[in-house]
Image (tube, grey):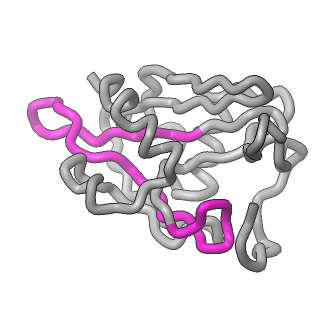
Amino acid sequence: MPNATVPTDLHRHAGDGWVTCGDHLHWGLFGAAGLLLVGRDDDGEPAQIVLQHRALWSHMGGTWGIPGGALAPDEKPAAGALREAAEEAAIDPAAVHVVGTHVLEHPAWTYTTVVADVAPGYRIEPRAADPESLEVRWVGLGDLGSLTLLPAFGEALPRLLTLLG
């Protein structure tokens, strides 16, 4: 749950809300999704990813994770992840090439990580685009250990990195 006053100028939709799953809560009445956007080096190897430094008022605020959030009713995970990345990180969906997904399933809730590359011919300069972020930027894969990651993201990260190809 949030730990400070929530701003009033947030993007809101009918999917916003908490789901009880056993002894804990998840954000997103219809599940949630996030965008793991990969930047590659000149040899085509994964070199960096876009991360969001979560606002202090948000659930587990102050940690780093990927842009994402609650799915709207009937919204597909890839569409939701791209929408959230546009809202939170100013990432143009046309500049993103989705290459795969990873689904984390709980009994009452799912989270889909949408893995993507920058589409050919595009350059992406992410930035904090709404009050949900303290900062959004490219982070080198070798620098991930120096950040305080959102615990669920940190736990999933080794599996997610294998999807980068």
Q: Quadrant of the C terminus?
A: top left
Which quadrant of the view contains residue 130?
Answer: bottom right
Of all residues shown, which one is farthest toward the bottom?
Answer: 5
Q: Nearer the viewer, residue 153 or 136?
A: 153
Residue 135 on image: x %, y %: 46, 69
**Above or below 104: residue 84:** below
Q: Is residue 61 magenta?
A: yes
Which quadrant of the view contains residue 133?
Answer: bottom right
Residue 103 on image: x %, y %: 57, 23
Which quadrant of the view contains residue 156?
Answer: top left
* Residue at (52, 57) in percent of width and height: 89
Q: Is residue 78 magenta?
A: no
79 displayed left or right of 107: left
* Residue at (76, 46) in percent of width and height: 25
Residue 85 on image: x %, y %: 56, 48
* Residue at (75, 61) in percent of width and height: 1
Of all residues shown, which one is farthest toward the front?
Answer: 23
* Residue at (83, 41) in percent of width and height: 19
